[in-house]
Amino acid sequence: VLARPVDCRLASRAFRKLLTTDTVPTQLREIPLVHPEIERYGKQLGAIGVPRLQVDEIIQCLGDDAWLEAQGLEWFIDLYNYLAGQGWATSLRLNGLRLLPVESGERVSATEQPVYFPNEEAAEAIEEHAEISSAIQLAFLSPDLYALIQESSELRKWLADVLDVREW
C-alpha cells in the first residue's frame, strides 16, 4: 500500500514484536506502519516527513479490546516486558486500560476493581465467606498467566507498581 509520508509511521522493533499477522489494532489500520524492510532507512524516512509512532497512538492500540482479545497469555508477557522497558509506561498513562487477564477469562483494569495475584489462602477465604465476597468486586490474575510470570520478580514488581496488581 502506498501512503504519503505523513500518513504512515515508523515503529520500534520492540513494538513490532507485539504485532502478529493475524490481528492489527484498529489504530494501525488507519495509520499504517512503514514496511519493516525499509524501516532501516529511518533517517531518510524521517527527512521526508515520516514520523515515529507516538506514545498516544500506542496507548490507543492498547485500548483496542478486539486486538487484545485476540492475544494469548504469552503475548501479554511480551506486552508487559515491552511496557516495562518504556519510560512512558507509567500507571498514570496506563490507567484504565484492560491489560490484566483474570481468572474469569475476562480482561480488566485495576481501576475497575482490585486485582490480586493468585493465592490459595485468599481463594479459601472467599469460598468460606461467599455471602460477603459476592458483594465485593475483586479479581485474581489468571493463574495460567501467573504461572508464566511467577519466576520473574521484576515483572511481578512491575505489575504491582504500574498496573496495581496486589498481593493478598
Image: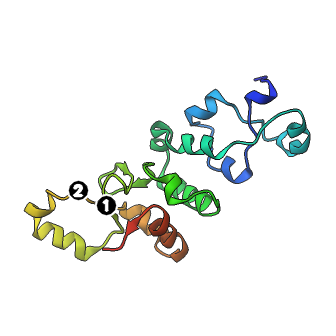
Quarter of the picture containing the C terminus is bottom left
Secondary structure of the residue carrying tag 1 is loop
Task: Tell me: residue 98, above or below residue 139.
Answer: above
Secondary structure of the residue carrying tag 2 is loop
Q: Residue at x 68, y 47 (%)?
A: 16
Task: Tell me: residue 79, above or below residue 61.
Answer: below
- The dot on residue 74 is none
Residue tagged by mark 2? 137
**Residue sitting nearer the eye, 37 or 153:** 153
Check disc 2 and give the amino acid type.
Gln
Say few, some or many: other residues with alpha carbon within 10 Å of mark 1 (under 14 / 14 to 19 / 20 or more): some
Task: Name the residue furthest front.
Answer: 92
Tell me where residue 49 sits by quadrant: top right
Residue 140: percent from left, percent from top: 32, 62
Residue 124: percent from left, percent from top: 18, 72
Q: Residue at x 80, y 24 (%)?
A: 4
- The dot on residue 114 is 1
Residue 64: percent from left, percent from top: 49, 38
Residue 132: percent from left, percent from top: 11, 63
Q: Residue at x 49, y 42 (%)?
A: 63
68 on left or right of 56: left
Quarter of the picture containing the N terminus is top right
Tell me where residue 129 sits by quadrant: bottom left
Circles 2 and 1 in contact, beta carbons < 8 Å: yes
Check disc 1 and give the amino acid type.
Pro
53 on left or right of 79: right
Say few, some or many: other residues with alpha carbon within 10 Å of mark 2 (under 14 / 14 to 19 / 20 or more): few
- In space, the residues marked 2 and 1 are separated at their CA atoms by 7 Å
First in sequence: mark 2 vs mark 1: 1
**Residue sitting nearer the eye, 88 or 2:** 88
How was the colour assigned to the protein in this rendering? rainbow
